[in-house]
Image (cartoon, rainbow, N blue to C red):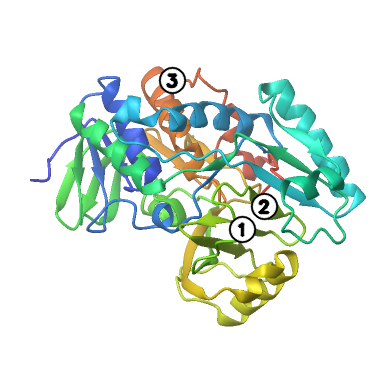
Amino acid sequence: MLPTTADIVIIGGGCMGVSAAYYLAARGAGQVVLLEREKFLGMGSTGRNAGGVRYQFSTEVNIRLSIFSLAVISHFEELCGISACYHPIGYLFLLQTPKEVEVFKANVELQRRVGVPWVRYLEPREIAQLVPLVNLDGVLGGTFCPRDGLADPNSVTQGFAKGARAHGAQIEMETTVTGIKTERGRVAAVVTNRGEIATRTVVNCAGPWAAQIGALAGVDIPILPVRRQFFTTDALPQIPREHTFVIEFATSLYFHPEGAGLLVGMSNPDEKPADTYAIDEDFHCKTLERAIYRLPLLENACVASQIAGLYEVTPDAHPILAQARALSGFYIAAGFSGHGFQHSPATGKVMSELILDGKATTIDISMLDLERFAEGRLVQEVNVV
């Protein structure tokens, strides 16, 4: 039964929502209620991503979010009783211009300074030894971190949900938020298709739909849904199962082992914001053409499946992790611009601190406030694809 009151209402049952529910409930935050409009958890962006986890970012805050999150993901079974299926196959970024080389060498220095000693810059001959099946025409260098890799979004989502319930959180499925009531500048209640919940604290974890939830509360959130698509192949026995995750930075082409085959994707620079999971067949063909260029043996593979998901994009490719100044009690944890799943553990942790203590102390997230966009304080992440 849907409760009529709650201390905290979380909107969105993807990896962010359940992580926030877990860390809040574990802190004894009172009655924590998570609302998900679908029949199952993780059916939005969480269930439609490539599963990558990495330390290789270009800003200190993102690197610190990765350090905390990957520590949790790599020991997830100890925390939640479910393995996150973490496979540290490494991320290799292929660089094709002197400017890219300059930027990524600076990124490596920052990553090492912040606490990622394993990352390194590679010359073309070293890349050829690492990925001998990849065509390296035009590649000037690359960066590689052996502890980057893959994890399973569904396992992480279910694990956090299990832990949240064990600590007393209530998770309500097939519950659509239709309104947010406010009184005297603060949250007062959440209205759903199943009834109303009086609360003074709402956490917006709605991902690509975070702006729609914000609009219900009169809060303008600059997050847009942008389609990204990828495909998987049938078996490719020539590819080792531990083959590194390869990204051609200039085009955003990427591929990594998936089952007995490969998962291959690329971002469409001409994609317009839209809420759609339809496959763009023309761009699929462009992706396939570029993928065969970089990995010629793909010419012999068959496409097994095609999947589209939604990035939740902000103007600076950083999330919003904050309370809206204009509405007390309205918190936002969304806008990860394609790297949300891997930062979900840290997000739940820092949001629990922000809500319960008034400030995040595990990681300084003060620069990720909502108001930075209107005030021109963007924190640009350049290492996104």
Quadrant of the frame with the N terminus = top left
Direction from residue 344 to residue 25 in the image, left or right: left
Instruction: Answer with the quarter of the image where residue 81 lies.
Output: top left
Q: Which of 34/57 is in front?
A: 57
Q: Is residue 65 left or right of residue 120?
A: left
User: In the displayed image of the protein, which residue is found farthest to the front?
Assistant: 237
- The earlier-in-sequence mark between 2 and 3 is 2
Give the vertical position of 316 relative to 19 (above or below). Answer: below
Determine the residue positioned at 12% across, 40% down: 3
Q: Residue at x 69, y 34 (%)?
A: 59
Judge whether 48 appears above or below 156 on screen. Answer: below
State the SS at label 2.
Answer: strand
Could you tell me if the residues under marks 1 and 2 are in contact, i.e. CB atoms within 8 Å? yes
Residue tagged by mark 2? 246
Q: Position of residue 69 (x, y in %)?
A: 49, 31
- Vertical placement of residue 221 versus 280, above or below: above
Q: Is residue 219 visible?
A: yes
Q: Residue 358 shows which numbered tag?
A: 3
Q: Nearer the viewer, mark 3 or mark 1?
A: 1
Question: Which image quadrant: the C terminus?
Answer: bottom right
Residue 320 image point, x, y percent: 53, 40
Distance (Cα) linking label 2 and label 3: 40 Å
Q: Residues within 10 Å of mark 3 (few under 14, many from 20)?
A: few
Horizontal and vertical percent position of residue 316: 66, 47
Residue at point 27%, 38% (across, down): 161
Dot 1: element: strand
Few, some or many residues within 10 Å of mark 1 (<14, 14–19, 20+): many
The location of residue 204, given as percent across then percent down, is 39, 44
- Residue on which disc 1 sits: 255
